[in-house]
């Protein structure tokens, strides 16, 4: 039973973990985290994660303060 439970647990948890990571990554890049998480989950994982990794924008950083 354990040999069956571990792969099932991985198949369920990896998409969820990937969606949370993508959500945080999207918000750091100035995009909607919820929409990206839905994209990752709904595009048949791992295809959605690969699409996000290929098309994600560069990381946004606030401009340095002068002075």
Image (cartoon, rainbow, N blue to C red):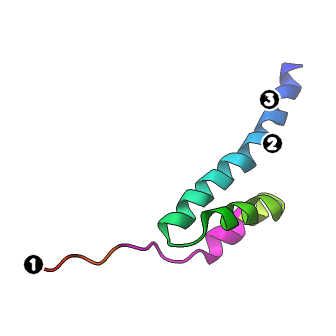
Local crowd size for mark 1, using a 10 Å CA cut-off: few (<14), some (14–19), many (≥20): few
- Residue name at image x 54 percent, y 77 percent: 57
Element type where label 3 sits in the image: helix
Quadrant in the rendering for residue 31:
bottom right
Q: Are marks 3 and 2 in contact (CB under 8 Å)?
A: no
Q: Which region shows up in magenta?
A: 49-61
Quadrant for residue 3, please give it. Answer: top right
Per the image, label 1 sits on a secondary structure element best described as: loop
Q: Earlier in the sequence, mark 1 or mark 2?
A: 2
Identity of the residue drawn at 78% across and 64% down? 47
User: Residue placed at 84% from the left, 20% from the top?
Assistant: 2
Tell me how many marks there are.
3
Residue 13 at what x, y percent from top left?
74, 41
Image x and y of residue 17, in percent: 66, 47
| Quadrant for the C terminus in the image | bottom left
Residue 67: mark in rendering: 1
The front one of 56 and 38 is 38
Q: Is residue 57 above or below residue 42?
A: below
Q: Earlier in the sequence, mark 3 or mark 1?
A: 3
Residue situated in front as seen by the camera: 20 or 3? 20
Residue 52 on the magenta segment? yes
Please state which of the two labelled residues, at mark 3 or mark 1, is closer to the viewer.
1
Residue 11, numbered label:
2
Where is residue 36, by image quadrant? bottom right
- Looking at the image, which residue is at 66% across and 62% down? 34
Location of the N terminus by quadrant is: top right
């Amino acid at each position: 039973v354990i040999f069956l439970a571990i792969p099932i647990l991985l198949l369920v948890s990896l998409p969820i973990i990937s969606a949370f990571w993508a959500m945080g990554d999207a918000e750091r890049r100035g995009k909607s985290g919820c929409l990206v998480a839905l994209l990752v989950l709904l595009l048949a994982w791992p295809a959605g994660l690969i699409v996000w990794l290929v098309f994600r924008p560069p990381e946004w950083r606030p401009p340095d303060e002068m002075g």
